[in-house]
Structure formats: structure tokens, C-alpha cells
Image: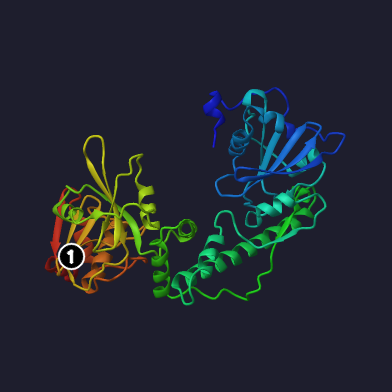
């Protein structure tokens, strides 16, 4: 999207004039001028005595700043933007509906200058427009519904679909799956969970606004609720699929390469961080940091060329904070992706997906702690990245949550190599936790199975 600041060097202008939407009501009410789609906004237009006022609703998350709205308008109208709109205004996410959702506005001047963003009340906006502005809850912002709105319309009945966590991609993916598909099961469960939550939230928000509107001098009295959620015809949530179906379903989805699966993944990452995906964290290490890292890196092979990345590969590539994202690779043993990047100084860094399960039944034979990475070797000479979850990092060399979590994981892996990452704060054996706390952070340290068992028993 074009950015006004880049073109003109400055984006604001301190104007002595009173801001458009803080002026007193004009003698003639505004005239509704229909809707216009501008980027990821639908803007309803009122022609007023002070110029055209654009009343906008964002159709995606992260779009609630008045400056972003002005940038979108600039991208469509360029130097003529001030001839199209005198002011733009949009609602923020409602936090406390004892008061109406907050509104922020920005005025447009010649030469692509903008006022500072300023807050206005619903009363002030209604005074300039000559009518109560229509409000669409963030779960009810359907592009066609907003575009078709006209003054005097009754509230539209809209299936809930929140702009922060849209469910449509989940439903579309499930529709194409065969009967009994785990992918369809997890998508439909999450879509229904989201729709129920969003519909109930929209109902509650509308009820709170209506109740607050009855109070004296309430700004909510100037809010016109323009949409209500469609009825929920299913009595209750069906319940989350069991763990086996969840993991099988998400494994099917994250190995796909199509844009629909990518859209589903984006929703899931916002929902729970992908905790049921086959991978958890991303490991970042220098392959020369220890023999285990060098051995693991040496077995990687190039990912298949000439096709789009899988959902997991795309997610990994986006985690590489560089214009040059490096070489996409694949680890056959774990089935996971990795990226090897060499910087301008010749230093090599590997970014690797960390699976949530170790794919062998052979018992743990040793663990190597190096840098920020935990390496697990099994009795069949397999080498694995230790399972981990976002927010539950594995570390050592001090007294804290990291060594506690690592000791808990090792305690499980000693008995069952297929154990999942620690998702609750288990109490590990004190001796094993003390060993992790005393392990030097510098260099690489390896403990064999006998040493770990002795620490656990001590």
C-alpha cells in the first residue's frame, strides 16, 4: 500500500482550523452517498456541509488506526484524496461497552497533508452526518452487507465470522474432504467453536449497547446497531475431537501446499499457536556448534524443487528474519523442514522445525546441550531435536522454568521416548533438575543414559 509519509516526507499538519468532526452540527443534515470499497475497508459516505465524511469499517485485523485508513485512501486517490474526503473515521474494538466503541478520525488537507488522529464521540459524528452512524460488530463485518446498507434499513442478520479469526477457510477446506477425514473433523470443530463464540459475543455487545443507551447522556444512544448474528441452530458445541484425530487432521493440513490450507493455518495460529500441529518451536543453531548439530545438518537434503512450499515450510521460511531466506531443506528421519542460511560473512545458521514427538521406539541413550538446542540420541543411533512447545522453552545453567521444563521432559523421555513436550508444570525429580541447573551454558555438554538415571535417582 502506498504510504503518504514516503512520498511527502511528513504526514501531519498542525492546522489552526477546528477538526471537521468536532464542529457544531451543520444546519442541513448530511446526505448519504453510498458505499465504496477501499483496500481492506468498506467506507460509507456522507456528503455534509463540511465536505464528504467517510465512515469506515475494517475487514481485517490490525487495520484500526486512522492513519492506516488514510494510507488506503491515498493508495486509491493519490493527490486528489482531499477532494474525495474531508475526514475519515472508524471505530475501534469495543473494550468496555458501558461506553460506546471509541472512534478515531483524521482530516485530509491539500498536498496530501493529514491532521493528527483525534478521538470523536458518537454524538459528534451523528451531529455532522445528521443521523446515527451504523455500527457493525467485528464478527458481523460482511463486505456485501456493509456495502448494501442504507439509512432506515433494519439490522441485517449476518452469520458470525470475526475479522480477527475468520472461519470461512476452515469451512471451505472441510467441504472438499472425504467422509471420515480427520482434517475435516478438526476444521468443522474449530469453525463451529469460533462461530458460536463470535455470535454470542456479538449478541452480548449489542445488548450492552442497548442497555447503556437508556442511561442519561450516554454516547451509546447515538449508535445504530446495523447487524445482528444469525441464529445458532446447533444446540451446543460437539466437543473437541480426541487427540489422535486432532493430530492426524492438522498433520494432513500442514503438509498441503495450497493457499486454502495456508489460510486455515493462519487462523489456527491465531487461535492456539498451532499447539496440536506436528511441530512446536523453531530451533536456531550453528551447525558447527557441536558434533550433534553438524551430524544432524549433514543428513539434510534439498526440498523438492518447482513446487510451492507446504504450510509448515512456508511458516518456517517466514521465521527466517532476512531478505535472503536461504536454502529450504528436508529431514527424512523426522519428516520436518529446515532452512540453511549463509550470511555475507560466511556464517551459517540453521532454522529447523522441532517435532512434538520423536519418531522412534528406541530408548534414549544420551542428551547433548549446546547453545540453545537440546539434542536427543537414541539407542538405534538416531539423532533428534528434543520436543518443545512455544512459550515452554528448554534451557539449563540457572534456577528457573527452563531447566525445570527440560528436567521434566528428560524424566519422561527416559521412560517413553515418544512422550510429548511438557504442557503442564510437572514436578521433575530434584536430582535431575539440579543437574540441569548446574550444567554450564557455554560449550556443549553430553550426559549418557546412566548419568541421567543416576541423577534422577539421587
Question: Which quadrant of the structure image shows residue 347?
Answer: top left
Q: Read off the residue under disc 1.
A: 382
Looking at the picture, how far across and down is residue 57, in whole percent? 66, 47
Residue at screen point 78% across, 48% down: 222
Residue 177, given in percent of the width and then of the height, sits at 48, 70
Q: Is residue 404 left or right of residue 8?
A: left
Residue 200 in the image: state x and y as whole percent: 64, 65
Residue at the spot 22% in from the left edge and 47% down from the top edge: 286
Q: Give the residue displayed 26% in from the left and 63% down from the top.
A: 334
| Of residues 71 and 374, the one drawn nearer to the viewer in this rendering | 71
* Above-or-below relation of 69 to 166: above
Dot 1: within a 10 Å radius of its alpha carbon, few (fewer than 14), some, or many (20 or more) residues? Answer: some
The quarter of the picture where residue 384 lies is bottom left
On the rendered structure, is 336 left or right of 14? left
SS for callout 1: loop
Instruction: State the residue at coordinates (23%, 62%).
Output: 433
Image quarter hosting the N terminus: top right
Q: Is residue 86 visible?
A: no
Name the quadrant of the C terminus: bottom left
Q: How many marks?
A: 1
Q: Nearer the viewer, residue 113 or 307?
A: 307
Residue 88 shows in this picture: yes
Q: Residue furthest front?
A: 306
In terms of image quadrants, where is residue 365? bottom left
Amino acid at each position: 500500500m502506498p504510504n503518504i509519509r514516503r512520498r511527502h516526507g511528513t504526514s501531519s499538519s498542525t492546522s489552526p482550523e477546528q477538526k471537521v468532526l468536532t464542529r457544531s452540527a451543520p444546519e442541513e443534515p448530511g446526505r448519504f452517498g453510498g458505499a465504496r470499497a477501499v483496500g481492506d475497508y468498506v467506507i460509507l459516505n456522507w456528503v455534509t456541509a463540511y465536505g464528504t465524511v467517510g465512515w469506515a469499517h475494517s475487514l481485517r485485523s490490525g487495520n484500526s488506526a486512522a492513519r492506516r485508513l488514510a494510507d488506503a485512501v491515498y493508495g486509491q486517490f493519490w493527490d486528489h484524496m482531499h477532494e474525495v474526503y474531508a475526514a475519515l473515521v472508524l471505530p475501534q474494538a469495543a473494550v468496555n461497552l458501558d461506553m460506546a466503541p471509541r472512534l478515531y478520525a483524521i482530516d485530509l488537507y491539500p498536498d496530501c497533508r493529514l491532521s493528527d488522529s483525534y478521538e470523536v464521540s458518537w454524538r459528534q459524528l451523528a451531529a455532522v452526518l445528521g443521523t446515527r452512524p451504523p455500527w457493525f460488530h467485528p464478527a458481523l463485518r460482511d463486505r456485501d452487507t456493509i456495502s448494501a446498507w442504507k439509512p432506515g434499513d433494519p439490522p441485517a442478520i449476518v452469520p458470525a465470522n470475526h475479522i480477527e479469526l475468520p472461519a470461512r477457510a476452515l469451512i471451505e477446506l472441510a467441504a472438499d474432504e472425504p467422509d471420515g477425514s480427520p482434517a475435516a473433523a478438526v476444521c468443522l470443530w474449530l469453525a463451529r467453536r469460533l462461530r458460536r463464540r463470535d455470535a454470542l459475543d456479538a449478541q452480548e455487545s449489542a445488548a450492552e449497547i442497548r442497555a447503556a443507551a437508556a442511561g442519561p447522556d450516554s454516547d451509546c444512544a447515538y449508535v445504530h446497531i446495523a447487524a445482528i448474528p444469525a441464529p445458532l441452530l446447533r444446540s451446543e458445541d460437539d466437543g473437541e475431537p480426541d487427540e489422535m484425530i486432532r493430530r492426524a487432521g492438522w498433520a494432513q493440513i500442514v503438509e498441503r501446499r495450497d493457499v486454502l490450507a495456508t489460510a486455515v493455518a493462519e487462523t489456527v495460529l491465531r487461535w492456539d499457536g498451532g499447539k496440536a500441529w506436528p511441530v512446536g518451536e523453531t530451533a536456531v543453531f550453528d551447525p558447527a556448534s557441536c558434533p550433534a548439530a553438524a551430524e544432524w545438518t549433514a543428513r539434510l537434503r534439498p526440498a523438492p524443487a518447482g513446487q510451492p512450499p507446504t504450510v509448515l515450510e512456508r511458516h518456517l521460511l517466514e521465521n527466517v528474519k532476512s531478505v535472503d531466506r536461504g536454502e529450504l531443506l528436508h529431514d527424512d528421519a523426522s519428516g520436518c523442514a529446515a532452512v540453511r542460511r549463509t550470511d555475507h560473512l560466511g556464517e551459517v545458521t540453521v532454522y529447523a522445525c522441532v517435532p512434538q514427538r520423536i519418531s522412534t521406539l528406541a530408548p534414549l541413550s544420551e542428551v547433548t546441550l549446546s547453545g540453545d538446542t537440546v539434542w536427543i540420541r537414541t539407542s538405534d543411533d538416531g539423532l533428534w531435536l528434543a520436543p518443545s512447545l512455544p512459550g515452554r522453552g528448554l534451557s539449563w545453567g540457572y534456577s528457573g522454568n527452563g531447566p525445570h521444563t527440560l528436567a521434566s521432559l528428560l524424566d519422561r523421555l527416559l521412560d517413553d521416548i515418544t512422550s510429548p513436550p511438557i504442557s503442564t508444570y510437572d514436578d521433575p525429580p530434584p536430582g535431575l533438575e539440579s543437574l540441569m541447573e548446574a550444567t554450564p551454558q557455554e560449550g556443549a555438554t553430553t550426559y549418557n543414559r546412566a548419568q541421567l538415571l543416576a541423577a534422577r535417582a539421587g
